[in-house]
Each structure stands twice: as structure tokens, then as C-alpha cells.
């Protein structure tokens, strides 16, 4: 057997060990503490709590502003800047800035992740509203609809795929970055990834598997919800062109 | 755990002044240590980004060209690259380590797989957006199918393709900050190595941001040079 074959066997063993860590748990490398198995559940919960809170606050902050600016078709430059800066700041640097300047703790982690979540939500919602045909908006205005009524009953339904796409992008990004939240004192599923001296290589690999599955599960779930909330008329025109409903193309990429 | 010893080395720095022992932002310390600590990781980071985006571009562009004439391929390619894009990069690095080992190869595989979805989408959308009249005129002038592709559709798609490459590049600069999990170096190891020292975090994080903006600017410049007709049409 060549070195390639040996490597495949070693890799299979590594993955088997990691799955054993996820399913059964074990004692920590440093001794005395249970890790893996059911001990992963509180970490999973913490991961979801942090992600949900960050995306929730980001939506509350970004959506009203984006809908309003998008409706006025104003502030393109500000939106482009938010998109560029949001992409250019690495998530690790964002966590690093937070640790160095405001310190450890759940509120500080939440602040960093909220800042990370805002750009995709804001930019997609803005583009979604601003790209609605001016003729449609004029027709609504001509029928005597109020401006808030136009946003709520005309522009927002037409923008649903993009608005929702932005939220999806943010959720997946925040789940990914919450993985390194243990660096800022929040014990998420990434704890084993940043502390392999406690969890061992199997723990680190096991946590990587969990985080990858969590991100894919979140993406697929949100894709299904998106199909349910998208108005019927939009679905007819957009889904017929492609066969694969997940990972839809209707997203402005601002991760 | 070779990368743990790497961090141990990174942790060691002299803290002579009050500013440094308070983990403050210390211009003196930065000036003294910039050359020794940050220059090599910066270029390593740049190397990771450039190789990964190039590899990703070659694959995504080829897939885009193939899928342009066979539209049914677009769905499956977007689906598969979309799953790759969804896997958090930290997890991707660690999942590859048992198979491809620690180092540059693992980092490049993971990082280039993130660029595929972004670039592929823009290539396909750009090629499809060529006006039917331009295509008809080219066919009427006697161009073959592949001449239409390379002389009409690809040039007209360049702005969209460049937009994809620019997004992929800035994204990759950020994700490469996590490549130290695959022991592939870069600026991320420095950030991780001394997270509470403001001077260190600001310089290492700042260099990532500067790199992202400079590469983006260079690509924009290259785009302007290669598509002179866009500006001519606007003027």
C-alpha cells in the first residue's frame, strides 16, 4: 500500500474518532471534565442563542432604515460603502477588536456579531426595495396609496426574495463566526476548535463537523421558509428558470 | 500540535513600557516591531489570497463557459458550490486537515472553494446578459459559435466577471485570516496569538483591511483598462 492509502486509513480513523466524540463524549485531555456527547447540547444552545440575538438585533436596526432609504431611492453611496467595509473587515479581526477594546463577555460578542450581521441584511433589503419598477410604484401612488402603504403592500412583497436572502447570508455568516466566539468568552460549539489542548484533535474535528452541519441545516431551513413566504407571483417567474430551489441566485453577495 | 507551538512563539514579545504592559495602543512598539513581526505574515496572507482566487477563478470561469451553452448545468453547479460556500471556513480547514494535511494546499482548497459560487454566478449572468442584437450581428458577420463567445460575449461580460472576482477577493482576504487553523500562516495567527494587545490587533487586523481595499482598487483599475468602451459609452 502506498502513502496515499495509508493516509486514507488515517483520515478514516480521525473522522471515526471525531464522530465518537460527538455521539458518546469522553474525558477531557487535561482530565476530570466530560467533553463531547451530551455536553455539546449547551454549547449548541449558546451558539443558536448568540446567532439568533445578533441577527434579530441586526434586522431591527437595519431593516427599517433600508426600507426607508430604498423607498426614497436615496443613499446609494452609503449603501455601497457599508457593503465594501462589511466585506473588507475580517470576522476574526472584528472579534479581535472587540476583545482588545471592550473585553470579554456575551454582550460584547453580541455587539461584534451584530455589526457583522448588519451589512448583508441592510444592503439586500435596500437593493430589493430600490429595484422595484418605478412604474409599479407610480401606479400604486396613482391609486391613492399612502407612502407607508406602498412600502408595506407593494415594494416589500416584491422585495421578499432579496430581503430574505440578506437575512440568510447573515445567519450563515454569524453561525460561522460564532464558532470563534469562545475567544471572546462565549462557550459555543467552537470551544473545541479554539481549545484543542483541552478537547484533543478528535474534539476539534468533531466540533468542525457539528458547525458545518449546523450551517447547512440553517441554510436549508431558511431556504424552505423563504419558499413559503415568497408571494406566488414572484415564485412563478423566478423558480421556473432553475431547477434547484436552495442556494437561490437572488442574493447580493455581501458576506 | 505544531500550530500551538506557533502561537506560543507569537505570544512572546517584550513589554518594556507602561503602554505595552497595559495592552494599549503603542505607536512606538508598532514602529519597532512592524518589520520583524508583520511583514512576512502579510506577504504570506497575500500569497494565500492570490493563489486561491486564481485557482477559484480558473475553475469557476471554465464551469461558467461550459454552463453558458448548457443551461441545465447552472442549477446543479450553483447547488454544489452553494453547499461549499455555506460550510464555515474554520470548519472547512479542519475537515480537510485529516485528508490533505496541514499547510498551504489545505488552505488553498478551502479558500478557492469559497470563490467558486461568487465567480461562477457572475460569469454565467454576465455571459447571458450580452444583447441578442450583438450576438445576431456577430453571427451575421460570419463568426462561428466559439468566436461569438470569445469576441462578443466574454468581452461584454467582463464588467460582471470583474465584479465577481472583486467580491471573491475581498471575501478571501477575510477568510484567509482563519487559515492559521490549517497551519497555513497569514495575519490571522498574529491576531489570534495576542488577542488582548490593542497594538497587535489593530496592526494585524488593519493590514487585512488595507489589503482588501488595495486589491479591490487594483482589480477596479484592471477592469477600467480592459473595458475602455464602458467609459466611452458613458462620456
Image: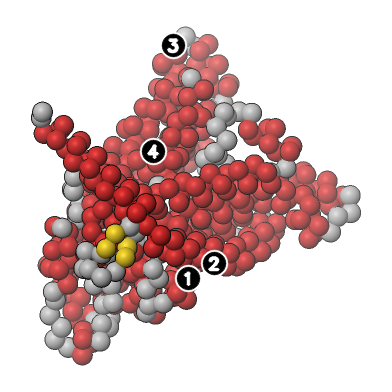
How crowded is the residue under tag 3: few (<14 C-alpha within 10 Å), some, or many (20+)?
few
Above or below B2: residue A229: above
Identify the disc placed on residue B116.
4
Q: Residues within 10 Å of mark 4 (few under 14, many from 20)?
A: many
Per the image, label 3 sits on a secondary structure element best described as: loop
Give the colour scheme of this rendering: secondary structure
The chain ID associated with circle 2 is A
Q: Circle 1 marks a residue in which chain?
A: A
Q: Are marks 1 and 2 in contact (CB under 8 Å)?
A: yes
Q: Give the mark, 1 or 2, whose residue is nearer the N terminus.
A: 2
Q: Residue pushed farthest bottom?
A: B18
Q: CA distance from mark 1 to mark 4?
A: 30 Å
Q: Residue at x 38, y 33 (%)?
A: B60
Numbered tag placed on residue A110 in the rendering: 1
Q: Which residue, given by chain and number where applicable, does mark 3 sit on?
A: B144
Front-most of residues A115 and B230: A115
- Asked whether residue B206 is in view, the answer is no
Q: Nearer the viewer, mark 2 or mark 3?
A: 2
Residue B121 located left or right of residue A227: left
Instruction: Please name which of the two marks, 1 or 4, marks the residue nearer to the observer.
Output: 1
Of the image marks 3 and 4, the number of the one nearer the N terminus: 4
Residue at the outermost right position: A144
In terms of secondary structure, where does tag 1 sit?
helix
Q: Nearer the viewer, residue A1 or B67?
A: A1
User: Which residue carries the number 2 mark?
Assistant: A53
Residue at mark 1 to residue at mark 3: CA–CA distance: 57 Å
* Residue located 45% across and 18% down the image: B148
Residue B190 placement: quadrant: bottom left
Q: Chain of mark 3?
A: B
Label 2 crowd bin: few (<14), some (14–19), many (20+), radius 10 Å: some
Amino acid at each position: 500500500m502506498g502513502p496515499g492509502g495509508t493516509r486514507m486509513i488515517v483520515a478514516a480513523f480521525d473522522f471515526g474518532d471525531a464522530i465518537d466524540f460527538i455521539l458518546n463524549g469522553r474525558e477531557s485531555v487535561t482530565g476530570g471534565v466530560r467533553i463531547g456527547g451530551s455536553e455539546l447540547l449547551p454549547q449548541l444552545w449558546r451558539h443558536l442563542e448568540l446567532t439568533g440575538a445578533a441577527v434579530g438585533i441586526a434586522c431591527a436596526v437595519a431593516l427599517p432604515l433600508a426600507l426607508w432609504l430604498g423607498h426614497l431611492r436615496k443613499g446609494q453611496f452609503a449603501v455601497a460603502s457599508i457593503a465594501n467595509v462589511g466585506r473588507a473587515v475580517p470576522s476574526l479581526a472584528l472579534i479581535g477588536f472587540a476583545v482588545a477594546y471592550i473585553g470579554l463577555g456575551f454582550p460584547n460578542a453580541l455587539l461584534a456579531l451584530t455589526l457583522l450581521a448588519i451589512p448583508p441584511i441592510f444592503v439586500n433589503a435596500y437593493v430589493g426595495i430600490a429595484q422595484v419598477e418605478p412604474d409599479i410604484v407610480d401606479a400604486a401612488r396613482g391609486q391613492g396609496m399612502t407612502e407607508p402603504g406602498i412600502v408595506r403592500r407593494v415594494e416589500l412583497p416584491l422585495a421578499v426574495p432579496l430581503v430574505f436572502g440578506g437575512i440568510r447570508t447573515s445567519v450563515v455568516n454569524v453561525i460561522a463566526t460564532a464558532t470563534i466566539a469562545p475567544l471572546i468568552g462565549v462557550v459555543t460549539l467552537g470551544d473545541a476548535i479554539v481549545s484543542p489542548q483541552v478537547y484533543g484533535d478528535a474534539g476539534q474535528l468533531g466540533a468542525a463537523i457539528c458547525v458545518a452541519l449546523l450551517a447547512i441545516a440553517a441554510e436549508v431551513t431558511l431556504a424552505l421558509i423563504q419558499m413559503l413566504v415568497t408571494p406566488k407571483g414572484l415564485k412563478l417567474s423566478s423558480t421556473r428558470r432553475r431547477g434547484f430551489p436552495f442556494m437561490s441566485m437572488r442574493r447580493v453577495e455581501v458576506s | 500540535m505544531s500550530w500551538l507551538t506557533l502561537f506560543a512563539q507569537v505570544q512572546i514579545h517584550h513589554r518594556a513600557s507602561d503602554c505595552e504592559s497595559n495592552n494599549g495602543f503603542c505607536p512606538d512598539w508598532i514602529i519597532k516591531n512592524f518589520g520583524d513581526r508583520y511583514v512576512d505574515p502579510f506577504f504570506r496572507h497575500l500569497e494565500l489570497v492570490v493563489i486561491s482566487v486564481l485557482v477559484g477563478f480558473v475553475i469557476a470561469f471554465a464551469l461558467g463557459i461550459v454552463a453558458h451553452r448548457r443551461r441545465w448545468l447552472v442549477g446543479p453547479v450553483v447547488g454544489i458550490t452553494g453547499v461549499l460556500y455555506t460550510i464555515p471556513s474554520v470548519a472547512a480547514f479542519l475537515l480537510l486537515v485529516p485528508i490533505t494535511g496541514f499547510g498551504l494546499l489545505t488552505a488553498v482548497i478551502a479558500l478557492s472553494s469559497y470563490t467558486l459560487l461568487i465567480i461562477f454566478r457572475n460569469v454565467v449572468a454576465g455571459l447571458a446578459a450580452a444583447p441578442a442584437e450583438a450576438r445576431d450581428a456577430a453571427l451575421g458577420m460570419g463568426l462561428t459559435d466559439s468566436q461569438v463567445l470569445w469576441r462578443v460575449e466574454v468581452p461584454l461580460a467582463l464588467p460582471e466577471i470583474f465584479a465577481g472576482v472583486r467580491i471573491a477577493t475581498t471575501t478571501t482576504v477575510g477568510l484567509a485570516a482563519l487559515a492559521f487553523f490549517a497551519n497555513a500562516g497569514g495575519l490571522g495567527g498574529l491576531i489570534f496569538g495576542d488577542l488582548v494587545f490593542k497594538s497587535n490587533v489593530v496592526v494585524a487586523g488593519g493590514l487585512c483591511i488595507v489589503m482588501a481595499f488595495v486589491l479591490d482598487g487594483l482589480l477596479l483599475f484592471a477592469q477600467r483598462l480592459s473595458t475602455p468602451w464602458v467609459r466611452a459609452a458613458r462620456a
